[in-house]
Amino acid sequence: MTCRRAPRRNQGQPLQNNPHTTLITPTAPVTAATHGGRAKCLQRLVRLDLPVPRTVALSFDAVHRIAQGDLPDISAILGEFSPETLLCVRPSSEDPDWGGPGAVLNIGMNDARHADLCASLGREAAAALYLRFVQSYAIHVARLDPDMFDDIAEDGASGLKATLHAYETETEEPFPQDPADQLAGVLRSMARAWEGTSARLLRQAKGAPADAGLGLVVQEMIPGVGQGECGSGVLQLIDPVTGLPQITGRYLSQSQGREALGAGTAALFLEKDARGPSLQDVAPDAFTALKRHASLMREKLREEMQLEFVIENGQVHILDGVRVARSGRAAVRIAVQLAQDGIITPQEAVMRIEPHALNELLHRQVAPRARRDLLGRGIAASPGAATGRIVFTSADAQAAAARREACILVRRETSPEDIRGMHAAAGVLTERGGITSHAAVIGRGLGLPCIVGASSMKFLTGKNQVIAADGRVLKAGDIITLDGTTGQVLAGEPEMLEAALDDSFQTLMGWAEDFSDIGVRANADSPADAQTARNFNAQGIGLCRTEHMFFEPGRLTVMREMIFAETSADRAAVLERLLPMQREDFTQLFRIMQGQPVCIRLFDPPLHEFLPATRGGQRELAEALGLPVSDVIRRIEAMEEYNPMLGLRGVRLGVTVPEIYDMQARAIFEATLKASEEGDPVVPEIMIPLVSAKREVELVKRRVDAVAAAVRSEQGRGFDFRLGVMVETPRACLRAGEFSHLTSFLSFGTNDLTQMAYGLSRDDAGRFMSDYVNQGVFPEDPFHVLDTEGVGELLKLGAERGRQTNSGITLSICGEHGGNPESIAFCRSAGFDYVSCSPFRVPVARLAAAHLAIGHQISGQEDETD
Ligand code: PEP
Ligand code: MG
């Protein structure tokens, strides 16, 4: 353990068990909450009997008092160490991620110690230790400008002399020689640095409370320089990017602190390595001891730890252990492996992975170490990274795909006409739009990296140019990278990490499902989406937006013909052509979902999305209708609405042109019978969109029931189905009690509900949302994180009133919020049965749901023991 060498100073009181300034022993009163994570970790290492240098821990209170000028008994602290020992002071914040002031090494160095060490360590080493201390004391304690030492080129004795001279000239004082003065100065400066304004702001940015405490540890220095094999380094048992077992780290002979990690040093590898010499070559026993210590720490501290170590004449000392910083994919592998090794429980493994962090595994990512050449920013609308050549039209995207060339589709905003281009592109960048705009919704559905509302860049799409935030001009064919996870647009092609849906991920997801108590379904509009949903073990489809099916190549024109049909006979003829297409769509979905619930929303277009906006589209439609283009344009103008999102949408179309819903209901029922012949019985769910009045539900229900009866009698076979209402207008929430007895389920469409509750266009909010969030008007983008206060109140009212007249009604949400962990917490506490989100968000939602259930279990147990 820690007892080393010469007798201690013994002048002060021993610091055993003083709650504020205590020697770290196995039983000392040290906790992370009072002395910080580093002090607590050192105590754990001491308890494991690892070779940890003697250490005194100062509590948060003690450090706070130091900042106010009230020093602890310095001689008592020094009394814990032998007089010739050099010391270092390191920060120990409650959470190591909150940082702290830099460590100061070699406290106690003075002219006398320097002379002694010249004899024992050699002149070079002694001078290096002293010089390092003078410099760090000058910068951190005397607060001198670091540049003042730039001109001193020499090291060794002459460098030391010049450095001391520079210090004394600048401060007009001799360099302090008394170790007590030195230690007091270091403690005071570190305590004050932590309480300064910039440090407060920095740690607040990292999520720490502004008044978070700082502990300090005063530790005996093992110099890392001197006779025999001496040096310092770090070691860990895994690769921090992949999480795979691999001894990684560096070691530098005759070095201190983290010098081994500096660029351009002659650091050694740890394990034998073909690329160069290793610690295993030069000090095999020390290497074996380090590996043994690291394994013990992994097992007993129940975490992959990075060891900071020093070798002194071949002997290993462990200075510190910190949790290995890791990528998202490494985090999953580590947690699962620890659970599989019986070191932690599966519940704990699940709790250790932050749900949002899964995005990094589900999609390609920019490698954490890659250099980022930032061109601009927008809203991170669909995660993952994609590189490709800029194209400005969907036709060019399709042409690029035909050449097997990756491209990024750049548009002001996307419309249904861009769907083919989006399918062909590797990523999508738009100037306009918010988190629920067309590009964002489609991008998430396709798992396509997407950035919308990139208003920091100028889109001159007419000129086929985009101007980056710093003025660089980007043209068609230039290579850019979208980081849809952060919203950054980058120049060129940075290094990427591939998606990692490996065994560890699958195992973690299996555990998450076992522990969850709210269902997770997927929003899926195509067989490909449904397959993704199935692969991620979604518990059904919670929303199939049927209008997206008509964006498929070859169908858009038929759909437009239907919209343009002037007579009932014309419409019936077009619907006749659409029926088999829809029947095939639904049959495929039912087959893929294998008997799981599939909730199909009846047609809900904002009609404008289907009208051709380009000359080419108008010409195509004119050909299909056998009309002159001018006629088509006139008709489009006649159908234009001032506010299409509040116009002839959803059930309003179903009421005014009921044949469309009749056709869809028939397609659903015929597909049900077909798919049920081949596999598990299917019970389809049919959902009526944008309801605001009871009569709408009655009218649609009557027709859907009639179609069901007709199909049953035509086919001579029975089937069940469930009819539900999509609650996405404020009035539907308020009046849910009026129509819920007519339905089996209510699914809250929180995209439209948010839009209508705020009176905030979901397609235009991107323009000013960041200003609103930055100025604290909204805590978050309400299209992204559910507004639990306002929109949440509407949800609660709707759920409550719905249950009053139909106690067994199924409740869910299917807006984009369904994939957001904070919003899932709200739904779970409101007693909803499931959430439904884009297929690629299903794993995030499942993990979030498991966290909530496990967290609830733990707090329940705590309540019982209270
Ligand atoms: C909603 O409004 O929340 C919803 C899911 O429907 P859409 O996004 O298709 O309008
Ligand atoms: Mg909606």
Image: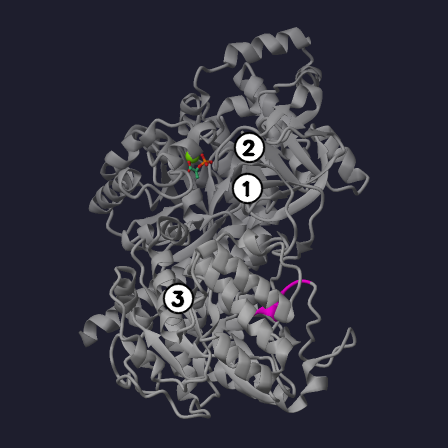
First of labels 2, 1 by sequence position:
2
- The boundaries of the magenta stretch are 258-263
Image quarter for ligand 2 equals top left
- Do the numbered discs 2 and 1 sit on residues whose CB atoms are within 8 Å? yes
- For disc 2, the neighbor class at 10 Å (few under 14, some 14 to 19, many from 20) is many
Q: Give the structural element (helix, strand or loop) at label 2.
A: loop
Residue 691 lies in what quarter of the image?
top left
Q: Is residue 275 left or right of residue 10?
A: right
Tell which of 667 and 432 is nearer to you: 432
Measured along the vertical axis of the image, is residue 24 above or below residue 576? below
Taking the magenta stretch, the answer to whether it contains residue 259 is: yes
Residue 186 got which mark?
3
Q: Amino acid at mark 2?
A: Ala
The image position of residue 75, as x and y in percent, is 31, 79
- For disc 1, the neighbor class at 10 Å (few under 14, some 14 to 19, many from 20) is many
Quadrant of the image for the N terminus?
A: bottom left
Residue placed under numbered mark 1 in the picture: 487
Residue 751 lies in what quarter of the image?
top left
Q: CA distance from mark 3 to mark 2?
A: 47 Å
Q: Amino acid at mark 3?
A: Val
Tell which of 369 and 437 is nearer to you: 369
Q: Amino acid at mark 1?
A: Gly
Residue placed under numbered mark 2 in the picture: 454
Tell which of 102 and 277 is nearer to you: 102
- Do the numbered discs 3 and 2 sit on residues whose CB atoms are within 8 Å? no
Residue 110 got which mark?
none
